[in-house]
Image: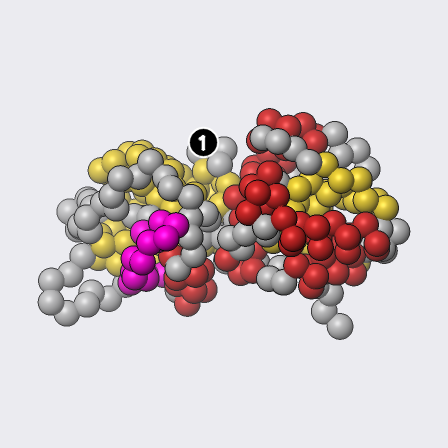
Amino acid sequence: MATFATSDQLLVIIDPVARQTDGESVRIAKDVLSAGAAAKVCLPEDPEEFARALGRRGSRRPVVVGDDRALVRAVTLLHRRRELAGCALSVVPVGDSALAESLGVPGGTVAAARAVLEGAERRLDLLVDDSDGVVLGALGIPPAPVRAAGGSEPVPAVSGGPWYRSLVRTLATRPARPTRLSAVPAPGTRLRVEVDGRTVVDLDQPVEAVSVAPGPGGVASVEVRPLSVGAEATPLLASGRTVTVIGEAFRYRADAAVSGPVRRRTWRVAEGAWRLTLPAVH
């Protein structure tokens, strides 16, 4: 991992949602970053201005101050511009930060800002789908229900390995912006799941859930949980570089957003495709 000097020039992009929801944390982040490095602060008012600020970063190291959606937006923009490999991103979480914390970013504002100044960059894998979307952390089909702001929906049971379950469980207990998804599909979707061209489950076997996450070594970890009556069915596990899901129209949760419905989607692992600044390991 490459370390940074505090004299690096920073481009601090403060997401408008962060300014609206937690102005005090934004002020603290700005003060810590400005005290430790030469920082240019940008206050975009919408996603278009956010994109322009990131595109005009020059030699400055971009720091996103915002929630998980802002982090995913920055990675997606850089990926679609084919600039991701050459740009080390930093993030100071303000708002929902389950994804950022699962990647190793400190949850506290001061600790995260100090990691930007004193940390080290680490190369991470991600998933890229056939519509040029990216997944940094976890992918779930159907999307795990989340509690609306002010609601009290209990945490649902979710499939996937321990890392995936931890992330989705955290997302499910945090307030989320309302989506256009009116209801979570009932279990029993008929899907064909292929990993590197090999069929893990076919359309004749209804499934309760599918989870996919980029794992170490450039492979994705896949878990398919067949629908069962009575005793819990044994999950089907697989790993590979390409995952294709085909079948009934389905929605899926990728990181902090719900997408779909689609009838077919393919994700491939992009090994070491992006760099994130994390606390240095001493």
Residue 272 percent location from the top left of the image: 62, 50
178 or 22, which is in the foreground? 22
Q: Is residue 221 magenta?
A: no
| Residue 2, quarter of the rendered image | bottom right
Q: Amino acid at mark 1?
A: Ser
* Drawn side of residue 106 relative to residue 30, left or right: left
| Residue 120, quarter of the rendered image | bottom right
Q: Is residue 2 visible?
A: no
Q: Which residue is mark 1?
A: 131
Query: In the displayed structure, would residue 121 be above or below residue 60?
Result: below
Question: Residue drawn 24% across and 66% down?
Answer: 234
Q: Which residues are magenta?
A: 145-160
Taking the view exactly as shown, the residue that stands out farthest to the bottom is: 282
Colour approach in the figure: secondary structure
Q: Secondary structure at mark 1?
A: loop
Residue 243 percent location from the top left of the image: 39, 46
Circle 1 residues within 10 Å: few <14, some 14–19, many ≥20: few
* Drawn side of residue 266 relative to residue 83, left or right: left
Question: Residue drawn 88% across and 51% down?
Answer: 7
Query: In the displayed structure, would residue 191 be above or below residue 212?
Result: above
Residue 200 percent location from the top left of the image: 29, 52
Q: Quadrant of the C terminus?
A: bottom right
| Residue 73, quarter of the rendered image | top right
Q: Quadrant of the N terminus?
A: bottom right
Question: Residue drawn 29% across and 57% down?
Answer: 153
Residue 186 percent location from the top left of the image: 19, 48
Please tell me how many numbered marks the rendered image carries. 1
Q: Main secondary structure of the magenta part?
A: loop
* Drawn side of residue 53 relative to residue 198, left or right: right
36 or 257, which is in the foreground? 36
Question: Residue drawn 31% across and 58% down?
Answer: 152
Q: Is residue 43 visible?
A: yes
